[in-house]
Image (spheres, rainbow, N blue to C red):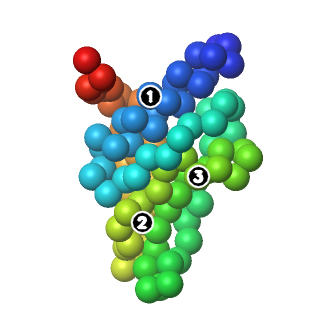
Amino acid sequence: MTILSRRSALVSFASALGFLLPSVAIEAMPAGSVSDLRFELYRDTRREYRWRLKAANGKVLARSNEGYRKKVDCRSAITRIREDAGTATVDDRTG
């Protein structure tokens, strides 16, 4: 897979996140490979669990817009994204 096709795959992945879960915010996508991605699970100021998807350079690509009271629920959201993103369609609304 070339770097360009990897970048396209990342853009498709990030776009798919918005359609899989309504609580996802998508950020600009830097160049990199799929293997450079990592999910980070953290607690916010309200002590709720959240996740963010980061590139190797630390740039946040996507994040949860909602907090989860239970860590297991946050991990389940990450699992759903990891399992379902590859089969998600892209809804190109650019015309």
- State the quadrant of the N terminus: top right
- Which residue in the protein does label 2 denote? 74
SS class, disc 3: strand
Q: Is residue 71 above or below residue 64?
A: below
Residue drawn 38% across the image and 72% down it: 67
Q: How many labels, in total?
A: 3
**Which circle marks residue 45 in the picture?**
none
Q: Residues within 10 Å of mark 2 (few under 14, many from 20)?
A: many
In the visual, does 55 lie left or right of 66?
Answer: right
Is residue 73 shown to the viewer in this render? no
Quadrant position of residue 19: top left
Which three-letter amino acid code belongs to the residue tagged 2?
Answer: Cys
- Which residue in the protein does label 1 denote? 12
In the visual, does 48 lie left or right of 36?
Answer: left
SS class, disc 1: helix
Q: CA distance from mark 3 to mark 2?
A: 17 Å
Q: Earlier in the sequence, mark 3 or mark 1?
A: 1
- Which residue in the protein does label 3 denote? 60
Mark 2 touches mark 1? (CB < 8 Å): no
- State the quadrant of the C terminus: top left
Q: Is residue 44 above or below residue 26?
A: below
